[in-house]
Image (cartoon, rainbow, N blue to C red):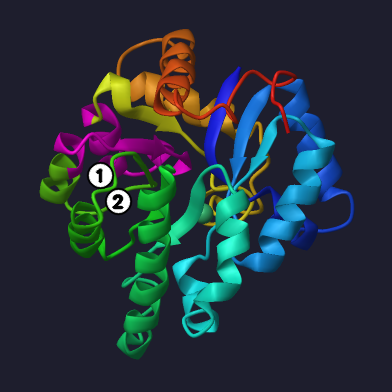
């Protein structure tokens, strides 16, 4: 089984007619356990419906920092979905793509709401850190978050190393095929913290010239194997066992078919 620890399966609806069906077929065909992150409440509803159709898609709830301003004054509306979600994502801060710093307090407010809930409910968080890596790290420390997946880390190496020291997990995605900085990061992640992702369908757009499809994960695994000078089989097995280890206290994450819900 392959692991896509950060994708947005609901967003295939925006790609066009039949895109979701093709994506689910590929997920099935290549046996890709896919953690489907949400951007907001409607996105989670959609992911839940897709998760009902496909056992390999795990829907999780979060509010993306880009959408945080819509929710900063209505955090109570999020509580039900947080309770229901087995993992929290996509959450975090974005000080890079969001240039208007008047929006940062709202991002922080929403992010801290989720961190407090994750701490309370013992849930893993799936994190967006773009341009705000240091602040994210400080907040993870403050909220004593023990289990975090840092998605597509591309920030400074000193903060990356501090995150490693805290026991965080890292997803490597399609940029490993193109960027020396990402390759350096992919090389340095300790084996027991390595995960793979696609950020499909939108994330890979700038690299592959269109929406990413699930099988792109195979190219990512190949790229990771190359920079780490090992085999595709070794990376596949490492990542699979890392995800199981990360979620060892979470009965929601079992082999497909064994999940209770
Ligand atoms: Zn994402």
The quadrant of the picture occupied by the C terminus is: top right
Magenta part of the chain: 163-188
Q: Residues within 10 Å of mark 1 (few under 14, many from 20)?
A: some
Res. 247 mark: none
State which quadrant residue 185 falls in: top left
Q: Which residue is drawn at 49% across and 19% down?
A: 240
Vertical side of 243 occupied by 261: above or below: below
Q: Residue 181 carries which label?
A: 1
* Residue 121 percent coordinates (x, y): 44, 47
The residue sitting at 42% across, 72% down in the picture is 110
Q: Where is residue 19 in the image (x, y as percent from the top left)?
A: 82, 49
Residue lying at the far bottom of the rendered structure: 102
Question: Mark 2 falls on what kind of element?
Answer: loop
**For residue 134, what is the image quadrant?**
bottom left
Q: In terms of depth relative to the viewer, which is nearer, 116 or 232? A: 116
Provide the residue designation for mark 2.
154
Q: Mark 1 touching mark 2, by CB under 8 A? A: yes
- Where is residue 119? Give x, y as percent: 35, 50
Magenta-drawn stretch contains 181 = yes
Residue under the point 21% across and 29% down? 188
Residue in front for this viewpoint, 38 or 3? 38
| Residue 93 in view in this figure | no
Q: Name the residue nearer the viewer: 108 or 260.
A: 260
Q: Is the magenta stretch mostly helix, strand or loop?
A: helix
Mark 1–mark 2 Cα distance, whole angstroms, equals 7 Å
């Amino acid at each position: 089984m392959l692991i896509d620890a950060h994708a947005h399966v609901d967003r295939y609806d925006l790609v066009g007619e039949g895109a979701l069906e093709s994506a689910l077929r590929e997920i099935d065909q290549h046996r890709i356990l896919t953690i489907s992150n949400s951007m907001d409440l409607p996105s989670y509803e959609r992911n839940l419906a897709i998760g009902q159709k496909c056992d390999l898609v795990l829907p999780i709830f979060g509010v993306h920092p880009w959408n945080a301003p819509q929710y900063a004054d209505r955090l109570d509306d999020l509580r039900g979905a947080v309770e229901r979600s087995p993992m929290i994502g996509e959450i975090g801060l974005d000080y890079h793509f969001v240039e208007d710093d008047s929006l940062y307090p709202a991002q922080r407010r929403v992010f801290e709401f989720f961190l407090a809930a994750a701490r309370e409910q013992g849930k893993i968080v799936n994190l967006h850190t773009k341009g705000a890596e240091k602040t994210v790290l400080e907040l993870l420390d403050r909220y004593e978050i023990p289990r975090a997946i840092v998605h597509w880390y591309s920030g400074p190496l000193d903060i990356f190393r501090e995150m490693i020291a805290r026991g965080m997990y890292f997803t490597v995605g399609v940029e490993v095929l193109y960027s020396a900085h990402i390759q350096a990061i992919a090389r340095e992640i300790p084996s027991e913290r390595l995960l793979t992702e696609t950020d499909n369908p939108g994330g890979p757009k700038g690299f592959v010239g269109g929406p990413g499809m699930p099988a792109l994960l195979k190219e990512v695994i190949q790229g990771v194997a190359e920079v780490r000078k090992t085999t595709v089989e070794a990376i596949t097995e490492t990542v699979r066992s890392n995800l199981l280890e990360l979620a060892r206290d979470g009965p929601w994450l079992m082999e497909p078919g064994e999940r209770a819900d």
